[in-house]
Amino acid sequence: MTTAGSYDFNGYQVLVVGGTRGEGHRIASAFSASGASVTVTGTMMLRALYDSDLSAFDYESVNLARQDSIDHLVGTIDHIDVLVLAASCNLPYGLPPDEQAFITEAARSGLLGPTFLTTRLRLKLGQSPALGGGCVVNTGAVTSWLQLASTPEAAQRQLAESTARAGRNWARLGVRVNSVLQEGRAVLPRQYAPSAAPVGGSRVAGDTIVRSQPRIGDAVTDATLFLASSAAARITGQTLRIS
């Protein structure tokens, strides 16, 4: 379990997209407890509309299915050291098929969703003075955007491949990109059915680390903070799979 004081993020500016609930909220809370200034995003206009306690964070509303909303969020950010993507795809129910198809293709092409936001923040992340440079950590929530146009298994492969590619290409800009995935669990868009339970076991598969933890949520939080810390300053392009 992540404990306050395990890492020192004093002076860090951290943005947790999807930090109002669940896994994202746990990650945001751990960064805040470790000294970081944390901004969380959600889809509601006001933080008071959430049941979670968001008093420790700054709050920004963003809709990752709209370019103008992403552009507005980017415009509010002057400095950023760590970007954590923990927002699942949440398209409105009853969306017309043509609009759903447009969003699906735009997200697949990187013109909407987490990929577009990351690209828009790339230069600002590259200005981070943190050891190892600016840091991006994708969580399994990102795969829900990829699942708009592929299976859960294919979406996880795509995320690992894009992480490796970005890790190589963005290193010259001073930005590290890594991912944390929960083994055996697909993160589906909210408009679809929930996924199966995680599978146990520990193993090492190539350059992908897989480990067991009694509480998956805590393990994902631990892995995220590690990847953002100075201890991981030389790690980029990697996907940590937690089972």
Image: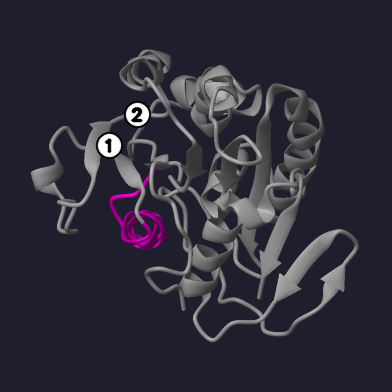
x and y percentages locating residue 224 in the rendered image:
55, 57
x and y percentages locating residue 172 in the rendered image:
77, 24
Q: Do the residues under discs 2 and 1 have CB atoms within 8 angstroms?
A: yes
Mark 2 lies on residue: 63
Quarter-wise, where is residue 197 in the image?
bottom right
Region rendered in magenta: 17-34
Tag on residue 43?
Answer: 1
Figure coloring? one colour
Q: Is residue 176 magenta?
A: no
Quarter-wise, where is residue 45 in the image?
top left
Q: Is residue 26 left or right of residue 175?
A: left
Can the viewer see residue 96 in this picture? yes
Is the residue 108 above or below the residue 241 in the image?
above
Q: Nearer the viewer, residue 119 or 229?
A: 229
Tag on residue 125?
Answer: none
- Image point 23% across, 37% down: which residue? 59
**Three-letter code, disc 2:** Asn
Kindly state the secondary structure of the residue where label 2 is placed: loop
